Image: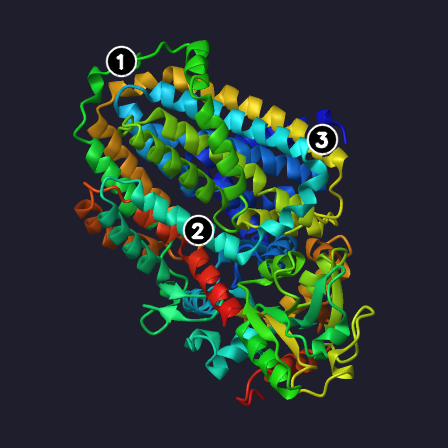
Amino acid sequence: MLIVELLPIILLGVMAGVIAGFIPGVGVFVSLTLAYPWLLQLNGIELLAFYVALGSTTQYIGSISATVFAIPGETSSLPAVKEGHAMFLNGQGGLAISGAAIGSFVGSFLVLGVCFALFPFLENVQFLYNTFLQAIILVCVAILICVATDHPFKSFSLAVVGYFLGLIGCRNIDNQCFATFGDHPDLVGGLPMLPVIIAIYIFPKLLQSSNFDNTNFLDKPIENNFFEHLRYFLDNWVTVVRSTIVGFFAGFTPGVSTTISANLSYTLEKFIQKRKKLYKEGDYRSLVAAETANNAGAFSCLLPLLILGIPIVPSEALLYEIASAKGFIFGETFTLETFKLLAIILVIVNFLALCIAWPFAKHVCWLHKIPVKTLNALIFIALIGVVYMAGAKFYSQEYYLIVLFALLPFGYLLRKYNTLPLIFVFVIQTRLDVIAIRVGDFLQ
Amino acid sequence: MKKLILAITMMFLTVTAHAKDKLYVVNTGSTGGSFNAIMSATTQDLKAYYDIEYVQAKSCAKGGSVVQKLVDNGQKAFFIWNGLKVASAYEGIINKNKACLLLPSVENFVRADLKYGMMFTKKGGIDASALFGDKQLTIGFNHTAIEALLKGFIKHHGLNHKTIRYENSKAIVMGALSGEVDMAVINSGSSFWKKAKKLKALYTFNPNGENGVAALASVSDAPGVDKGQADSFLVRGMNAKELAKFRSITREIFANKDANVTKWYASVLGYGSTLDKSDIEGVDMTLTAMQNWTSTKLK
């Protein structure tokens, strides 16, 4: 299939990615579900082109809403909320957005280049799916995220709270239920991610930043010039290469692929900067590390689907099923030609996404004319609406709102703490349990 | 003025006359699984007949609760119902939420998918005979009900194999492909058939064999090696006439080769159906398959 024929699909994917990245809770999976009737009209390659365009663009745009509004479009944007939003409040929003965008761009291309060079060996990707290896990765990342904070003991305590919040519900793997109070239908499915993240992570961030007077800042610590920003980015090339490698391998983690990529790389970079005594909140290198790894992971998590035909995140599973219905079976038709076509699609998508993300970097300074308190109040009201809409999709709008409002007081109490360890462990809790149970089975 | 009112009234009556009935389609499976794929495809086909609202419910407890709420509000609901989970709920293996204990009957039954479990390994993996050998094997499985069956099988033949839990069929296929487990058992053959080029079938639980794969029952007399399963497609909130119309629409959709759901089923192997049976026969076949997995008398 000619790339020209795919261009309209790619453009639609990019447009959908812009919307999905900007609105929290939408993300790739919800976008695919909404587009389902239309997707059924596409063939396998067109589906892949749309998915790649949607997924990649979401990563770019997600970091913009995370930086400016402290809203993570996806859980992989959590580091961008911490570092990017702090940079925004310090008048470096443009630099944060450009760093994230260029990082995403470079991360994608480095991974693409490596995969191209290693194409004959890619089939061995299946050997990364070893339970013990995955256990080591997950535990190490969780420990690293706690250790890399100013108060490791408090962070560990918060991580334990996150684990128990994630434990609520019934586990599929062994059907054990925790705190479901007589198997309450909503609690059986666990606490929904969106209201928990908003109450425990975003709400404290909004409270913290509300005391800032941002209206005096000028967004010019560095000239808002593309080449200036690029030069600043390239000064940190070691961070970029390191986070690409980390993000690429962490991206193979099933279920939590880009979340692990971004958070592991971010934590590692923060740890390094702290040891060099260079770190303070709003750290450019840590932000770039997270965003570069994020896109590297977004590509690597696609490889098991393409090569083995096994989806490792829910959105891929949906894509797989739609493609199956069209008679296109992933993993059976993956050739060097398909890879080359995918590479061209990625080049186009990343270029388009960068072109969209970049103007935000130039114009973000205008947002400083709005007082942070007003902006945060508007964001919070919008988030309540988003929670309601996300809940409605599962016929659980009341439950979503109850969880949000029940956890908000805790968010208020935790406003002076870094709640990332809590949220991170909450997000990966199911995966942690699955791996722990399986390790137990192997060792029995 | 009178003409205007008449025109508006006529328009209103025309619109109401052509307005489709509202139907809620509820997916009670995970968002990334085959239940969602089947229900999403069916939704597209049903749009020609109904005004559809699609709801993700993720579990029988939540799904049952959503359906109950809809019925209480006078709505009609169409949903997929995992037979193995219902039987497991009766057995107390999974949560015994009342909502899960719903059985198919002629008052709610539309159709059912009939399927059998499968034993497989990776391409170039162990031979089928190794299953009965002295060497300890690691066997992956993805459902608590299958674990009980597998442990019974191991005990029955005096084997020394180790069972390893996986969270879903995709994870177990990955476990087999990577060689992490020597072989795997899944509750539905469809996941195997999708990856048939990279995997090697050992046995099927279908007592008649399946697509050239030998029946486990042909080499083992252990209890349960010929157990089938059934996933039902049920409705609530419809009267007998509405249900009859819905069944007729379903048959019409399945008769169409270009329907989304027909295409989906055509892309996978390992599914049987009750569509060519009468409603009473369909319900009976479904209950018989569910009865395989519970000691509670279902019919």
- In this rendered view, identify the residue nearer to me: B299 or A165: A165
Q: Name the residue type under label 3.
A: Lys
Report the residue at 60% width, 38% height from top.
A51
Q: Name the residue type under label 2.
A: Leu
Decide: is B282 above or below A200.
below
- The mark nearer the N terminus, 3 or 2, is 2
Q: Where is residue A380 in the image (x, y as percent from the top left)?
A: 27, 38
Q: Which mark is residue A340?
A: 3
Report the residue at 47% width, 48% height from top.
A256
Decide: is B91 above or below B108.
below
**Nearest to viewer (mark 1 / mark 2):** 2
- In this rendered view, identify the residue nearer to me: B292 or A326: B292
Judging by the rendered image, the residue that carries numbered circle 1 is A218
- In this rendered view, identify the residue nearer to me: A335 or B113: A335
Asked if residue A248 can be seen in this view, the reply is yes
- The mark nearer the N terminus, 3 or 1, is 1
Q: Which mark is residue A138?
A: 2
Q: What element carries label 3?
A: helix
Direction right: furthest residue: B212
Residue A23 appears left or right of A438: left
Chain where mark 1 sits: A
Q: Where is residue A159 in the image (x, y as percent from the top left)?
A: 30, 52
Q: Position of residue A60 (x, y in %)?
A: 47, 29
Asked if residue A420 can be seen in this view, the reply is no
Mark 3 neighbour class, 10 Å CA radius: few under 14, some 14 to 19, many 20 or more: few
**Nearest to viewer (mark 3 / mark 2):** 2
